[in-house]
Image (cartoon, rainbow, N blue to C red):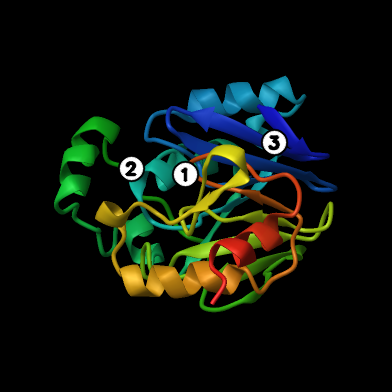
Amino acid sequence: MREIVDGVGELAVGYVHVHAVVDDRGVILVDTGLPGREAAVADGLRRIGRRIRDVHTILLTHRHPDHTGAAAALRAASGARVVAHAADAPAVTGNRPDPPRGVLRLAARVMGTPAPTPVDDWITGGGPVPGLPHVRAVPTPGHTPGHTAFLLDRAGGVLFAGDAAGGGPGGRVCRPPRLVTADRAGAETSIRSLGTLDFEVAVFGHGRAVTSGAARRFRDRWRS
């Protein structure tokens, strides 16, 4: 678990990042990594002196299995509530599975299929996450219909971008991968909208974190 700013850690689980936020109630996880990798998440938490039972909330940025894969196991082990956007939640609960197509079908054979899990809070728009006044949901549809970034009120603002954007070399901000993005035009609109927010740090599901001047990098990259 690598510390990004005070109380915010980043854990690489294979090729995807899981993020942990330590607050006065315990731990918030942003995404959960690949199916069957809950032990890796537990090990990452132990490195910062925390345990799975300390997790009180799991925020899911979107429904893809490399981000929701361990959600069921982690919820069962911790009793945490799971939060996801209403447009993606049915795929997480298993009520409306999201059958993989194209390159996602091939990827699913490698990643595995996540176990379904209840979603305790279905969010439908932006604003403070229920029960987390220091975390704001930021709708970023495109990569998936319900993709949601989260903005933490800490260290000048920490954006958890999920797959709305990626981090490249030298602090470069990148578009999400085209082959697994449902609505490319929507994703483009969303990534531009992130540049209108105020935040100092950005972390991503894939790629390197930007630890200073992050919002400016979004604006400079997608200046109209």
Front residue of 188 and 161: 188
**Where does label 3 land, which residue?**
9
Query: Please, is residue 183 above or below residue 34 in the view?
Result: below
Element under disc 2:
loop
Query: Quadrant of the rendered structure where residue 97 is?
Result: bottom left
Rendered-image quadrant of the C terminus? bottom right
Query: Quadrant of the rendered structure where residue 98 is?
Result: bottom left
Amino acid type indicated by mark 1: Ala
Query: Please, is residue 170 above or below residue 102 in the view?
Result: above
**Where does label 1 land, which residue?**
71
Tell me how far mark 1 sits from mark 2, CA to CA: 8 Å
Across and down, in percent, residue 54 comes to 71, 37
**Where does label 2 land, which residue?**
114
Could one spot residue 208 in this view of the protein? Answer: no
Q: Residues within 10 Å of mark 3 (few under 14, many from 20)?
A: many
Q: Which mark is first along the chain, 2 or 3? A: 3
Element under disc 1:
helix
